[in-house]
Image: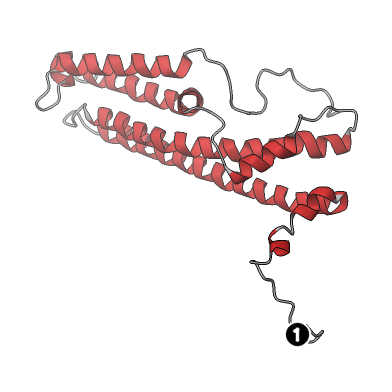
Amino acid sequence: MSADEPNEFDATDPEAREVASAAAADTEAFLSLMPHYYRGEVAQTGNRLSRLDLTIDWAIVVVTAVLALAFQSGDTAAYLLLIGLLGVTLFVVFDVRRYRTFDASRARVRVLEENLFATSLDPEGVPMTEWRSELSSDLRTPTFKVSYWEALSRRLRKVYYPLYLLLGVAWVFRVSLYTPNQSVLETASVPGVGGALVVGIVALFFVVVTAVAYWPHERDARGEFHGEVTGDWKR
């Protein structure tokens, strides 16, 4: 190939397909590659966090709208608040999936920060054993780092359980004190479903949600600022 001809990249060339393997053995090439990967991973984590925040924002909008409509007048059906509970539950389902993908990306970012950048700042620190192999394996075959139930518990406890409680307290007030001329069971009833059954289902729902949110379990999420004392380095 002459100097005037363009240098075309042939992806079928075995040497071209293994071009990145040279960086594994070359310290300078490896260190020049990692900041680009780190920035990309941080950007991806930020995008996934934004999607989480968007889900929360919409859940709050739904709760606000349901509360406003439910107490707009005495003629509004009390089960509108139960529809709000169902709407928040749908957002929880979406949120848990997004949280697990966010946590997987954040975990890769933390592996780099803990083992590459922290070690470069303090060589005395002890990096994770075989962190490069583990990170490489996760890039080839991405996996969730937390179980579905742990993610569900964390998201309920941190975000959605207070929204459930707000709707629950509003529903109790709506079927009891807000309509004193009707009995609780009459107000709580849903077309085709008796008030006693509705009250039982709502009570069972909150028992299950509370158990899922606060049931003790071993933590797998690589979250930050968990169970640590306040640092004093920033003077």
Q: Answer left or right for 137 relative to 27.
A: left
Element assignment for label 1: loop
**Where in the figure is residue 207, as x and y percent of width and height?**
35, 13
**Which quadrant of the rendered structure holds the C terminus?**
top right
Image quarter where the N terminus lies is: bottom right
Rendering coords of residue 182 (x, y %): 13, 16
For disc 1, the neighbor class at 10 Å (few under 14, some 14 to 19, many from 20) is: few
Q: Residue at x 75, y 85 (%)?
A: 5
The residue at 66%/46% (across/down) is 42
What coloring was used for the rendering?
secondary structure
Tell which of 179 and 188 is nearer to you.
Answer: 188
Q: Is 55 displayed left or right of 1 in the figure? A: left
Q: Residue furthest left?
A: 192
Residue holding disc 1: 5
Res 165 seen here: yes
Residue found at x 36% / y 33%? 88
- Res 76 → quadrant: top left
Residue 81 location, quadrant: top left
Count the numbered circles shown: 1
Q: Could you say which is closer to the camera, residue 63 or residue 106?
A: 106
Give the left or right position of residue 154, taking residue 207 as reference.
Answer: right
Q: Is residue 92 above or below residue 9?
A: above
42 or 166, which is in the foreground? 42
Q: Residue at x 58, y 37 (%)?
A: 104
Residue 219 vs 90, above or below: the answer is above
Q: Quadrant of residue 228?
A: top right
Amino acid marked by disc 1: Glu
